[in-house]
Image (tube, helix red, strand yellow):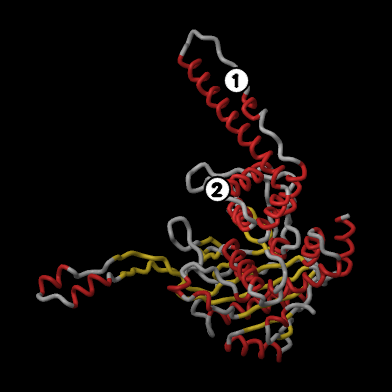
């Protein structure tokens, strides 16, 4: 059935299956993403080291921007279901059960037991014992949906949980005895080896009733959550829970020139010391409170970055239909999701150090969008790093190279459209005017983000 749907959607979107997005953005004294040592991430390319902003950081920024706007009733996805990626599904389900009148002593153990019953495992430490070991991306209302079912079948569920807890305690006791037998056998060199059946500890644990298991899987299923259809999910822990191939492909952003970064020395003032120093009665008292409260270093980077992402319109519609939407409803949702995807591509920025760098206020210098039968990644255009002393600046030189490359590709291939280009930069606007007058601009100019997407 999925093959038939895919074929039908592909025919309707023939030649327009993929929306490719390309951006150039200049960032000054920022650190949107860092490595395990707190340093800026880099990658070698074209004989030079480039600063890097990972695709994971960008995808999270874009995904959360879309969810926050939708939940606030704003943007193209207002009113649609969204997802949340968390380890706290037992806590969220227990909270929903408490709202339905359950006691705390029952709510959390029941929520954990039924999630364990479908294959999820929980942490071993005190602070993680109520958290699943893996992040699970599911619709935001999954906890409430599951709680409603558990509440409606309370007696049967509590009966099973009681059996489950007793069997688990017996299993833990059996495991402890097995360990002791092995220790004893290892200590007695003359004793015959003790054979221990490893699976015996689990043979008495009752399986989750089919109806309850179905309810858990239904609650955690992607359903009509738009951002799961867009970004996909993979959940190996539950074999029969559907995974989703995401419709969005995201490349890391990298500088079009050699990396530039500094280790910025900073000092933080101690307000109490400053107050005492200001009110000191003599020089010796003031000297005791001299110096900063704390000092350190932070890595900061500057540069013009190229980044790329693509949307598979067919995959998006197939994902939405697999979640239960009809073809027409999936089309409407896909158009709205595409608009939000483009907006997030332009506006979203990883939030690391946003308060000390104001990085989230940045706008790209240029955005190029076009359709095609396949995605087109133009990263290789910047294999030869741009000279930072280039006339007109790096961003203008990068824009000219990118647009001329796009013109070349559109002349030589039939599976790509000219598309649309948007700029928020005066210098690049002048470049667009020149290229347009000379017939060297393959893309039409857009004045708004909405105009970047096909109608």
Say the numbered circle drawn on residue 395: none
Q: CA distance from mark 1 to mark 2?
A: 31 Å
Q: Secondary structure at mark 1?
A: loop
Is 196 above or below relative to 306? above
| Marks 1 and 2 in Cβ contact (< 8 Å) | no
- Pinpoint residue 370: horizontal percent, then vertical percent: 74, 75
Q: How many marks?
A: 2
Q: Residue 207, how many percent across, how many down?
A: 71, 36
| Front label number (1 vs 2) | 2
The N terminus lies in which quarter of the figure? bottom right
Residue 361: x, y in percent? 53, 78
Task: Please tell me which residue lies in front, 273 or 92.
Answer: 92
Q: Nearer the viewer, residue 150 or 38?
A: 150
Is residue 14 shown to the viewer in this render? no
Indicate left or right for 408 with 101 as reference. Answer: right
The vertical placement of 274 against 422, above or below, is: above
Q: Which residue is mark 2?
A: 130
Residue sitting at 73 percent across and 62 percent down? 229
Quarter of the view holding residue 177: top right
Q: Residue at x 77, y 70 (%)?
A: 333
* Vertical order, 123 against 428 (above or below): above
Towards the viewer: 198 or 367: 198
Instruction: Please provide percent x and percent y for residue 342.
Output: 68, 74
- Asked if residue 171 shows in the view, the reply is yes
**Residue at image mark 1:** 196
């Amino acid at each position: 059935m999925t093959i038939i749907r895919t074929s039908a959607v592909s025919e309707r979107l023939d030649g327009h299956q993929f929306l490719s997005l390309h951006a150039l953005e200049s960032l000054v004294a920022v650190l949107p993403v860092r490595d395990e040592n707190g340093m800026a991430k880099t990658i070698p390319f074209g004989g030079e080291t480039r600063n890097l902003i990972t695709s994971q950081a960008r995808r999270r920024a874009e995904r959360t921007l879309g969810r926050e706007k939708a939940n606030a009733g704003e943007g193209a996805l207002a009113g649609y279901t969204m997802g949340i990626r968390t380890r706290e599904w037992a806590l969220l389900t227990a909270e929903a059960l408490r709202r339905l009148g359950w006691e705390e002593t029952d709510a959390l153990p029941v929520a954990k037991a039924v999630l364990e019953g479908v294959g999820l495992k929980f942490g071993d430490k005190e602070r993680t014992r109520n958290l699943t070991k893996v992040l699970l991306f599911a619709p935001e209302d999954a906890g409430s949906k599951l709680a409603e079912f558990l509440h409606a079948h309370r007696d049967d569920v509590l009966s099973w949980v009681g059996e489950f807890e007793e069997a688990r305690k017996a299993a833990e006791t059996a495991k402890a005895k097995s360990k002791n037998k092995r220790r004893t056998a290892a200590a007695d060199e003359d004793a015959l080896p003790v054979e221990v059946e490893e699976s015996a500890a689990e043979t008495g644990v009752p399986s989750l009733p089919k109806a309850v298991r179905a309810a858990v899987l239904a609650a955690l299923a992607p359903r009509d959550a738009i951002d799961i259809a867009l970004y996909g999910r993979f959940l190996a822990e539950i074999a029969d829970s559907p995974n989703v191939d995401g419709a969005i492909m995201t490349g890391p952003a990298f500088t079009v020139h050699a990396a530039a970064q500094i280790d910025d020395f900073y000092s933080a003032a101690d307000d109490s010391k400053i107050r005492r120093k200001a009110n000191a009665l003599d020089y010796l008292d003031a000297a005791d409170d001299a110096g900063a409260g704390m000092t350190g270093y932070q890595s900061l980077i500057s540069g013009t970055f190229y980044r790329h992402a693509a949307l598979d319109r067919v995959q998006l519609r197939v994902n939405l239909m697999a979640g239960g939407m009809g073809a027409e409803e999936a089309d409407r949702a896909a158009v709205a999701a595409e608009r939000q995807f483009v907006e997030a591509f332009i506006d979203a920025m990883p939030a690391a150090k946003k308060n000390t760098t104001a990085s989230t206020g940045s706008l790209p210098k240029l955005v190029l969008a076009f359709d095609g039968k396949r995605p087109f990644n133009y990263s290789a255009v910047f294999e030869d790093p741009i000279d930072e002393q280039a006339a007109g600046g790096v961003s203008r030189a990068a824009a000219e190279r990118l647009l001329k490359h796009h013109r070349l590709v559109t002349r030589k291939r039939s599976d790509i459209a000219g598309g649309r280009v948007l700029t928020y930069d005066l210098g690049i606007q002048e470049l667009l005017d020149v290229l347009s007058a000379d017939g060297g601009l393959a893309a039409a100019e857009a004045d708004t983000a909405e105009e970047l997407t096909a109608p």
